[in-house]
Amino acid sequence: MKTIPTLYTLTAILLVGLTTLASAQDEEAQRKAREAQRAMMRSPAMQQMQKNGMKQMMNSFWNGDGSNLMAIGLLQQDEFREGIGVSKEQHQKIGDVMSNMMRMHEDPDFKPFQDEMNKLMTETPGGPFGENASEETRQKFFDLQMKMQMTMVEKMANSVSENLTADQLKKVKEFQISMMSEIPIVSPSMFEALDLSDAQKKQLEGIKKELEPEFEKLVDKMADTQWKFSVKLQDELEDQLDGVTDPEEQQKIMQEIVNKIRKSNPELQRESDEMTESGKAFANSLKFRMFDVLTDEQMERLAELVDNPPEYVKKVIAHIRKQMGEDDSQAGGEWKPGPNSWKPGDAIPEEYRQQREERRFPRR
Protein backbone atom coordinates (compact mmCIF):
# COMPACT_ATOMS: atom_id res chain seq x y z
CA MET A 1 0.00 0.00 0.00
CA LYS A 2 1.71 3.17 -1.22
CA THR A 3 -0.38 5.80 0.56
CA ILE A 4 2.30 7.46 2.67
CA PRO A 5 5.17 7.78 0.15
CA THR A 6 2.79 9.15 -2.48
CA LEU A 7 1.38 11.81 -0.17
CA TYR A 8 4.83 12.71 1.12
CA THR A 9 6.01 13.19 -2.45
CA LEU A 10 3.08 15.50 -3.22
CA THR A 11 3.96 17.58 -0.16
CA ALA A 12 7.58 17.68 -1.25
CA ILE A 13 6.66 18.96 -4.70
CA LEU A 14 4.76 21.84 -3.11
CA LEU A 15 7.80 22.68 -1.02
CA VAL A 16 10.11 22.54 -4.03
CA GLY A 17 8.14 25.44 -5.51
CA LEU A 18 8.44 27.45 -2.32
CA THR A 19 12.17 26.80 -2.13
CA THR A 20 12.70 27.79 -5.77
CA LEU A 21 11.07 31.15 -5.18
CA ALA A 22 13.48 31.88 -2.38
CA SER A 23 16.61 30.84 -4.31
CA ALA A 24 16.56 33.94 -6.53
CA GLN A 25 16.94 36.30 -3.58
CA ASP A 26 20.03 37.38 -1.62
CA GLU A 27 21.19 35.52 1.48
CA GLU A 28 19.39 37.71 4.03
CA ALA A 29 16.17 37.61 2.02
CA GLN A 30 16.49 33.82 1.78
CA ARG A 31 16.88 33.56 5.55
CA LYS A 32 13.75 35.63 6.13
CA ALA A 33 11.89 33.67 3.48
CA ARG A 34 12.84 30.38 5.17
CA GLU A 35 11.64 31.67 8.52
CA ALA A 36 8.37 32.78 6.95
CA GLN A 37 7.99 29.38 5.26
CA ARG A 38 8.58 27.55 8.54
CA ALA A 39 6.02 29.68 10.33
CA MET A 40 3.51 29.27 7.51
CA MET A 41 3.98 25.50 7.21
CA ARG A 42 3.48 25.05 10.96
CA SER A 43 0.44 27.30 11.21
CA PRO A 44 -3.00 25.82 11.97
CA ALA A 45 -4.26 27.51 8.81
CA MET A 46 -1.74 25.67 6.61
CA GLN A 47 -2.52 22.43 8.40
CA GLN A 48 -6.18 22.91 7.57
CA MET A 49 -5.36 23.74 3.94
CA GLN A 50 -3.27 20.58 3.59
CA LYS A 51 -5.99 18.46 5.15
CA ASN A 52 -8.58 20.00 2.85
CA GLY A 53 -6.43 19.33 -0.21
CA MET A 54 -5.79 15.75 0.78
CA LYS A 55 -9.45 15.10 1.55
CA GLN A 56 -10.37 16.46 -1.87
CA MET A 57 -7.90 14.09 -3.53
CA MET A 58 -9.08 11.03 -1.57
CA ASN A 59 -12.75 11.89 -2.01
CA SER A 60 -12.27 12.17 -5.76
CA PHE A 61 -11.35 8.47 -5.84
CA TRP A 62 -14.14 7.56 -3.46
CA ASN A 63 -16.78 9.47 -5.40
CA GLY A 64 -15.85 8.29 -8.88
CA ASP A 65 -13.61 10.95 -10.46
CA GLY A 66 -10.44 9.17 -9.39
CA SER A 67 -10.01 7.03 -12.50
CA ASN A 68 -10.19 10.08 -14.78
CA LEU A 69 -7.82 12.11 -12.60
CA MET A 70 -5.39 9.19 -12.47
CA ALA A 71 -5.61 8.92 -16.27
CA ILE A 72 -4.44 12.54 -16.69
CA GLY A 73 -1.09 11.75 -15.10
CA LEU A 74 -0.75 8.36 -16.78
CA LEU A 75 -1.40 9.84 -20.23
CA GLN A 76 2.10 11.34 -20.01
CA GLN A 77 3.47 7.80 -20.39
CA ASP A 78 3.75 6.38 -23.90
CA GLU A 79 2.95 2.84 -22.70
CA PHE A 80 -0.36 3.88 -21.16
CA ARG A 81 -1.49 5.93 -24.18
CA GLU A 82 -0.64 3.08 -26.54
CA GLY A 83 -2.21 0.53 -24.19
CA ILE A 84 -5.67 2.14 -24.19
CA GLY A 85 -5.37 3.51 -27.76
CA VAL A 86 -5.26 7.28 -27.18
CA SER A 87 -4.56 9.31 -30.33
CA LYS A 88 -2.31 12.38 -30.51
CA GLU A 89 -5.37 14.55 -31.07
CA GLN A 90 -7.12 13.21 -27.95
CA HIS A 91 -3.98 13.69 -25.89
CA GLN A 92 -3.57 17.24 -27.18
CA LYS A 93 -7.16 18.19 -26.30
CA ILE A 94 -6.76 16.94 -22.72
CA GLY A 95 -3.38 18.69 -22.52
CA ASP A 96 -4.97 21.96 -23.65
CA VAL A 97 -7.44 21.79 -20.76
CA MET A 98 -4.55 21.28 -18.33
CA SER A 99 -2.66 24.22 -19.84
CA ASN A 100 -5.71 26.45 -19.46
CA MET A 101 -5.95 25.42 -15.81
CA MET A 102 -2.55 27.06 -15.30
CA ARG A 103 -4.16 30.35 -16.36
CA MET A 104 -7.18 30.01 -14.11
CA HIS A 105 -7.19 33.76 -13.45
CA GLU A 106 -8.55 34.06 -17.01
CA ASP A 107 -11.19 31.34 -16.50
CA PRO A 108 -14.69 32.69 -15.68
CA ASP A 109 -15.42 29.52 -13.67
CA PHE A 110 -12.71 30.44 -11.16
CA LYS A 111 -13.03 34.24 -11.13
CA PRO A 112 -15.78 34.46 -8.44
CA PHE A 113 -13.72 32.32 -6.05
CA GLN A 114 -10.52 34.27 -6.74
CA ASP A 115 -12.21 37.64 -6.27
CA GLU A 116 -13.58 36.59 -2.89
CA MET A 117 -10.26 35.06 -1.79
CA ASN A 118 -8.34 38.19 -2.84
CA LYS A 119 -10.80 40.30 -0.88
CA LEU A 120 -10.17 38.20 2.25
CA MET A 121 -6.40 38.48 1.70
CA THR A 122 -6.50 42.29 1.68
CA GLU A 123 -9.25 43.27 4.10
CA THR A 124 -7.42 41.81 7.14
CA PRO A 125 -3.73 42.47 7.99
CA GLY A 126 -1.91 39.27 7.14
CA GLY A 127 -4.99 37.90 5.41
CA PRO A 128 -6.78 34.77 6.68
CA PHE A 129 -3.41 33.45 7.92
CA GLY A 130 -2.67 36.50 10.04
CA GLU A 131 -2.73 36.45 13.84
CA ASN A 132 -5.65 38.88 13.96
CA ALA A 133 -7.79 37.02 11.43
CA SER A 134 -11.10 35.81 12.85
CA GLU A 135 -12.14 32.17 12.75
CA GLU A 136 -15.02 33.20 10.50
CA THR A 137 -12.56 34.74 7.99
CA ARG A 138 -10.39 31.61 7.97
CA GLN A 139 -13.35 29.31 7.54
CA LYS A 140 -14.71 31.40 4.68
CA PHE A 141 -11.30 31.23 2.96
CA PHE A 142 -11.14 27.43 3.39
CA ASP A 143 -14.69 27.04 2.05
CA LEU A 144 -13.78 29.07 -1.05
CA GLN A 145 -10.62 27.04 -1.48
CA MET A 146 -12.55 23.77 -1.32
CA LYS A 147 -15.14 25.00 -3.82
CA MET A 148 -12.40 26.08 -6.21
CA GLN A 149 -10.66 22.71 -5.83
CA MET A 150 -13.93 20.89 -6.49
CA THR A 151 -14.43 22.95 -9.64
CA MET A 152 -10.88 22.18 -10.72
CA VAL A 153 -11.32 18.43 -10.12
CA GLU A 154 -14.58 18.46 -12.08
CA LYS A 155 -13.03 20.24 -15.07
CA MET A 156 -10.04 17.87 -15.08
CA ALA A 157 -12.25 14.78 -14.84
CA ASN A 158 -14.52 16.08 -17.59
CA SER A 159 -11.54 16.67 -19.89
CA VAL A 160 -10.99 12.90 -19.85
CA SER A 161 -14.61 11.75 -20.07
CA GLU A 162 -15.36 14.19 -22.91
CA ASN A 163 -12.32 13.29 -25.03
CA LEU A 164 -11.96 9.53 -24.59
CA THR A 165 -14.30 6.96 -26.12
CA ALA A 166 -16.53 4.70 -24.01
CA ASP A 167 -14.19 1.76 -24.72
CA GLN A 168 -11.13 3.79 -23.65
CA LEU A 169 -12.86 4.92 -20.45
CA LYS A 170 -13.67 1.28 -19.70
CA LYS A 171 -9.99 0.41 -20.15
CA VAL A 172 -9.06 3.16 -17.69
CA LYS A 173 -11.30 1.52 -15.08
CA GLU A 174 -9.89 -1.90 -15.94
CA PHE A 175 -6.43 -0.44 -15.41
CA GLN A 176 -7.57 0.82 -12.00
CA ILE A 177 -8.70 -2.71 -11.09
CA SER A 178 -5.33 -4.12 -12.17
CA MET A 179 -3.66 -1.52 -9.93
CA MET A 180 -5.62 -2.43 -6.78
CA SER A 181 -2.45 -3.56 -5.02
CA GLU A 182 -0.78 -0.22 -5.75
CA ILE A 183 -3.55 2.34 -5.18
CA PRO A 184 -4.46 3.18 -1.58
CA ILE A 185 -8.15 3.80 -2.24
CA VAL A 186 -10.52 1.24 -3.73
CA SER A 187 -12.83 3.28 -5.92
CA PRO A 188 -16.32 1.74 -6.06
CA SER A 189 -16.84 3.19 -9.54
CA MET A 190 -14.03 1.13 -11.08
CA PHE A 191 -16.21 -2.01 -10.86
CA GLU A 192 -18.33 -0.50 -13.63
CA ALA A 193 -15.72 -1.93 -16.00
CA LEU A 194 -17.23 -5.34 -15.24
CA ASP A 195 -20.56 -4.42 -16.90
CA LEU A 196 -22.65 -4.12 -13.73
CA SER A 197 -26.41 -4.32 -13.81
CA ASP A 198 -28.49 -1.46 -12.43
CA ALA A 199 -29.31 -3.59 -9.38
CA GLN A 200 -25.61 -4.22 -8.74
CA LYS A 201 -24.79 -0.51 -9.04
CA LYS A 202 -27.48 0.23 -6.47
CA GLN A 203 -26.05 -2.40 -4.11
CA LEU A 204 -22.50 -1.00 -4.42
CA GLU A 205 -23.76 2.52 -3.78
CA GLY A 206 -25.49 1.30 -0.62
CA ILE A 207 -22.26 -0.33 0.64
CA LYS A 208 -20.32 2.84 -0.09
CA LYS A 209 -22.83 4.98 1.81
CA GLU A 210 -22.75 2.62 4.79
CA LEU A 211 -18.94 2.67 5.04
CA GLU A 212 -18.55 6.40 4.35
CA PRO A 213 -18.23 7.48 8.04
CA GLU A 214 -15.38 4.99 8.53
CA PHE A 215 -13.74 6.22 5.34
CA GLU A 216 -13.87 9.84 6.55
CA LYS A 217 -12.20 8.87 9.84
CA LEU A 218 -9.45 7.13 7.91
CA VAL A 219 -8.86 10.19 5.72
CA ASP A 220 -8.62 12.42 8.81
CA LYS A 221 -6.03 10.09 10.30
CA MET A 222 -4.03 10.08 7.06
CA ALA A 223 -4.11 13.88 6.91
CA ASP A 224 -2.84 14.22 10.49
CA THR A 225 0.08 11.87 9.82
CA GLN A 226 0.95 13.67 6.59
CA TRP A 227 0.97 17.01 8.41
CA LYS A 228 3.44 15.80 11.04
CA PHE A 229 5.69 14.47 8.32
CA SER A 230 5.50 17.57 6.13
CA VAL A 231 6.77 19.80 8.96
CA LYS A 232 9.91 17.64 9.24
CA LEU A 233 10.19 17.36 5.47
CA GLN A 234 10.29 21.10 4.90
CA ASP A 235 13.42 21.73 6.98
CA GLU A 236 15.34 19.08 5.04
CA LEU A 237 14.10 20.06 1.59
CA GLU A 238 14.86 23.77 1.66
CA ASP A 239 18.59 23.06 2.05
CA GLN A 240 19.08 19.95 -0.08
CA LEU A 241 16.93 20.95 -3.07
CA ASP A 242 18.41 24.42 -3.41
CA GLY A 243 19.55 24.77 -7.03
CA VAL A 244 18.47 21.24 -8.07
CA THR A 245 16.34 21.46 -11.21
CA ASP A 246 16.51 17.92 -12.64
CA PRO A 247 13.21 16.12 -11.78
CA GLU A 248 14.86 12.71 -11.38
CA GLU A 249 17.50 14.13 -9.06
CA GLN A 250 14.78 15.89 -7.05
CA GLN A 251 12.90 12.61 -6.76
CA LYS A 252 16.03 10.79 -5.62
CA ILE A 253 16.78 13.43 -2.97
CA MET A 254 13.18 13.41 -1.72
CA GLN A 255 13.20 9.61 -1.39
CA GLU A 256 16.46 9.76 0.58
CA ILE A 257 14.93 12.38 2.89
CA VAL A 258 11.80 10.26 3.38
CA ASN A 259 13.95 7.27 4.38
CA LYS A 260 16.04 9.42 6.71
CA ILE A 261 12.99 10.84 8.47
CA ARG A 262 11.49 7.38 8.89
CA LYS A 263 14.65 6.02 10.50
CA SER A 264 15.17 8.99 12.82
CA ASN A 265 11.51 9.28 13.89
CA PRO A 266 10.40 5.84 15.09
CA GLU A 267 7.25 7.22 16.73
CA LEU A 268 6.12 8.83 13.48
CA GLN A 269 6.99 5.64 11.60
CA ARG A 270 4.93 3.64 14.10
CA GLU A 271 1.99 5.98 13.55
CA SER A 272 2.45 5.67 9.81
CA ASP A 273 2.52 1.86 10.02
CA GLU A 274 -0.65 1.84 12.14
CA MET A 275 -2.38 4.07 9.63
CA THR A 276 -1.29 1.81 6.78
CA GLU A 277 -2.69 -1.23 8.56
CA SER A 278 -5.95 0.63 9.19
CA GLY A 279 -6.09 1.47 5.49
CA LYS A 280 -5.52 -2.16 4.52
CA ALA A 281 -8.21 -3.35 6.92
CA PHE A 282 -10.71 -0.83 5.56
CA ALA A 283 -9.83 -1.63 1.94
CA ASN A 284 -10.29 -5.35 2.57
CA SER A 285 -13.61 -4.79 4.34
CA LEU A 286 -14.83 -2.68 1.43
CA LYS A 287 -13.58 -5.13 -1.19
CA PHE A 288 -15.06 -8.19 0.52
CA ARG A 289 -18.48 -6.51 0.59
CA MET A 290 -18.25 -5.32 -3.00
CA PHE A 291 -16.84 -8.57 -4.38
CA ASP A 292 -19.88 -10.36 -2.97
CA VAL A 293 -22.09 -8.28 -5.28
CA LEU A 294 -20.28 -9.60 -8.37
CA THR A 295 -21.36 -12.66 -10.31
CA ASP A 296 -18.90 -15.54 -10.73
CA GLU A 297 -18.20 -14.43 -14.32
CA GLN A 298 -17.50 -10.86 -13.20
CA MET A 299 -15.28 -12.08 -10.37
CA GLU A 300 -13.31 -14.23 -12.79
CA ARG A 301 -12.79 -11.21 -15.04
CA LEU A 302 -11.63 -9.12 -12.08
CA ALA A 303 -9.21 -11.86 -10.96
CA GLU A 304 -7.80 -12.06 -14.48
CA LEU A 305 -7.15 -8.30 -14.53
CA VAL A 306 -5.40 -8.51 -11.16
CA ASP A 307 -3.41 -11.72 -11.61
CA ASN A 308 -2.55 -11.35 -15.31
CA PRO A 309 -2.62 -7.63 -16.19
CA PRO A 310 -1.90 -6.58 -19.79
CA GLU A 311 1.73 -5.95 -20.68
CA TYR A 312 1.33 -2.17 -20.77
CA VAL A 313 -0.05 -2.24 -17.21
CA LYS A 314 3.01 -4.18 -16.04
CA LYS A 315 5.27 -1.56 -17.63
CA VAL A 316 3.37 1.31 -16.01
CA ILE A 317 3.54 -0.39 -12.59
CA ALA A 318 7.29 -0.87 -13.04
CA HIS A 319 7.65 2.80 -13.96
CA ILE A 320 5.68 3.93 -10.90
CA ARG A 321 7.72 1.73 -8.59
CA LYS A 322 10.93 3.09 -10.05
CA GLN A 323 9.72 6.63 -9.32
CA MET A 324 8.99 5.54 -5.78
CA GLY A 325 12.59 4.38 -5.37
CA GLU A 326 11.81 0.66 -5.57
CA ASP A 327 14.49 -0.23 -8.12
CA ASP A 328 14.88 -3.68 -6.56
CA SER A 329 11.30 -4.51 -7.59
CA GLN A 330 12.14 -4.65 -11.27
CA ALA A 331 14.94 -5.69 -13.58
CA GLY A 332 15.35 -4.83 -17.22
CA GLY A 333 11.88 -3.32 -17.34
CA GLU A 334 10.31 -6.57 -16.17
CA TRP A 335 7.48 -6.14 -13.69
CA LYS A 336 7.98 -7.95 -10.37
CA PRO A 337 6.45 -7.48 -6.94
CA GLY A 338 8.64 -5.41 -4.65
CA PRO A 339 9.79 -7.01 -1.37
CA ASN A 340 7.91 -4.45 0.74
CA SER A 341 4.76 -4.17 -1.36
CA TRP A 342 1.59 -6.21 -1.45
CA LYS A 343 1.83 -9.11 -3.83
CA PRO A 344 -0.49 -8.75 -6.84
CA GLY A 345 -2.75 -11.50 -5.51
CA ASP A 346 -3.30 -9.55 -2.30
CA ALA A 347 -5.56 -7.22 -4.24
CA ILE A 348 -7.94 -10.15 -3.87
CA PRO A 349 -6.84 -11.60 -0.51
CA GLU A 350 -6.46 -15.37 -0.46
CA GLU A 351 -8.85 -15.46 2.49
CA TYR A 352 -11.62 -14.10 0.28
CA ARG A 353 -10.83 -16.43 -2.62
CA GLN A 354 -11.18 -19.42 -0.29
CA GLN A 355 -14.40 -18.14 1.26
CA ARG A 356 -15.98 -17.58 -2.14
CA GLU A 357 -14.88 -20.99 -3.39
CA GLU A 358 -16.37 -22.68 -0.34
CA ARG A 359 -19.68 -20.88 -0.89
CA ARG A 360 -19.76 -22.20 -4.45
CA PHE A 361 -18.81 -25.76 -3.45
CA PRO A 362 -19.68 -26.25 0.25
CA ARG A 363 -17.63 -28.82 2.11
CA ARG A 364 -19.54 -31.89 3.29
Image: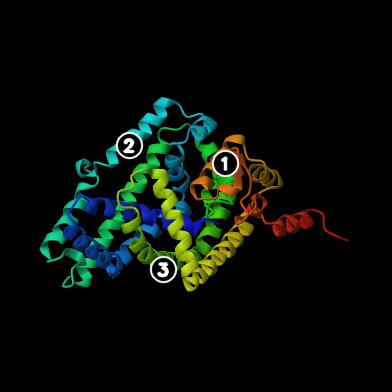
Residue pointed to by mark 1: 174
Instruction: Give the amino acid at mark 3.
Output: Asp
Residue at position x 40%, y 26% from top?
89
Secondary element type, mark 3: helix
Residue pointed to by mark 2: 97
Estimate the x, y position of residue 308 in percent, counting from the top left: 67, 41
> How many neighbours does mark 3 have within 10 angstroms: few (below 14), some (14-19), or many (20 or more)?
some
| Left or right relative to 277: residue 254 | left
Image quadrant occupied by the N terminus: bottom right
Q: Is residue 75 visible?
A: yes
Mark found first going from the N terminus, 1 or 2: 2
| Left or right relative to 127: residue 7 | right
Which quadrant of the figure has residue 11? bottom left
Estimate the x, y position of residue 13 in percent, counting from the top left: 36, 52
Estimate the x, y position of residue 280 in percent, counting from the top left: 58, 62
Check contact, mark 1 vs mark 3: CB within 8 A.
Answer: no
- Tell me: residue 229, above or below residue 317: below
Residue pointed to by mark 3: 224
Cα distance in 3D space between marks 1 and 3: 32 Å
Check contact, mark 1 vs mark 2: CB within 8 A.
Answer: no
Residue at position x 31%, y 62% from top?
49
Q: Is residue 59 visible?
A: no
Which-is-in-front pick, marks 3 and 2?
3
- Tell me: residue 263, above or below residue 237: below
Cα distance in 3D space between marks 1 and 2: 24 Å
* Extreme residue toward the right, this view: 364
Instruction: Give the amino acid at mark 2.
Output: Val
> How many neighbours does mark 1 have within 10 angstroms: few (below 14), some (14-19), or many (20 or more)?
many
Estimate the x, y position of residue 91 in percent, counting from the top left: 41, 31
Mark found first going from the N terminus, 3 or 2: 2
Secondary element type, mark 1: helix
